[in-house]
Image: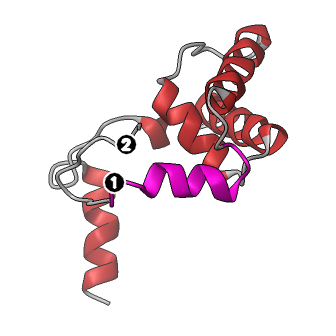
């Protein structure tokens, strides 16, 4: 039986993955793998995506968050990739203590 990987922050029961897949009718053996394969193929065909490789676990979580709907998952991925292209500054790494713009905004918020 598959299970979710151990995480330092979140703890799951051993049957959590199976239960979530069952909720979205993806519990049959190989069904989630097939859904992720379809999503990966769709991603490869999207010429406006600058990133074409996503972790399979991320794609599975996207399908689950999309309530088992591949069309909703595609829409989520499309929006995320579009936002990343239009507003790359949101996705950049930054140091919250030393970034001048963020530090100034935080001071305004905390000292109001």
Residue at image position (57%, 16%) is 51
Provide the residue designation for mark 1.
Answer: 14
Q: Position of residue 12 (x, y in %)?
A: 32, 59
In the rendered view, does 100 fall on the left or right side of 48?
Answer: left
Residue at image position (48%, 43%) is 90
Q: Are marks 2 and 1 in contact (CB under 8 Å)?
A: yes
Question: Is residue 18 part of the magenta span, yes or no?
Answer: yes
Residue at image position (30%, 41%) is 5
Element under disc 1: loop
Q: Residue furthest right?
A: 71
Quick one: quadrant of the C terminus? bottom left
Circle number at residue 42: none
Residue at image position (52%, 21%) is 54
Q: Position of residue 84 (x, y in %)?
A: 58, 33
Residue 53 versus residue 95 in the image, above or below: above
Q: Position of residue 31 (x, y in %)?
A: 69, 31
Give the colouring mode of the picture: secondary structure
Residue 49 versus residue 58 in the image, above or below: above
Rounded to the nearest angstrom, the CA distance separating label 2 from label 1 is 6 Å
In the rendered view, does 109 fall on the left or right side of 100?
Answer: right
First of labels 2, 1 by sequence position: 2
Mark 1, other Cα within 10 Å: few <14 / some 14–19 / many ≥20: few
Boundaries of the magenta span = 13-26
Provide the residue designation for mark 2.
Answer: 3
Q: Position of residue 88 (x, y in %)?
A: 52, 32
Q: Nearer the viewer, residue 87 or 62?
A: 62
Residue 71 occupies quadrant: top right
In the rendered view, does 13 fall on the left or right side of 7?
Answer: right
Residue 87 occupies quadrant: top right
């Amino acid at each position: 039986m598959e299970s979710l990987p151990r995480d330092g922050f979140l703890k799951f029961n051993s049957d959590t993955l199976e239960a979530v897949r069952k909720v979205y009718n993806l519990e049959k053996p190989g069904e989630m793998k097939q859904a992720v394969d379809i999503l990966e193929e769709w991603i490869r065909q999207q010429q406006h995506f600058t990133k074409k490789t996503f972790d399979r676990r991320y794609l599975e979580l996207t399908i689950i968050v999309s309530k088992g709907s591949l069309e909703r998952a595609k829409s989520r991925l499309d929006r995320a990739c579009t936002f990343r292209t239009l507003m790359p500054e949101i996705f950049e790494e930054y140091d919250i203590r030393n970034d001048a713009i963020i530090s100034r905004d935080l001071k305004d918020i905390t000292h109001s």
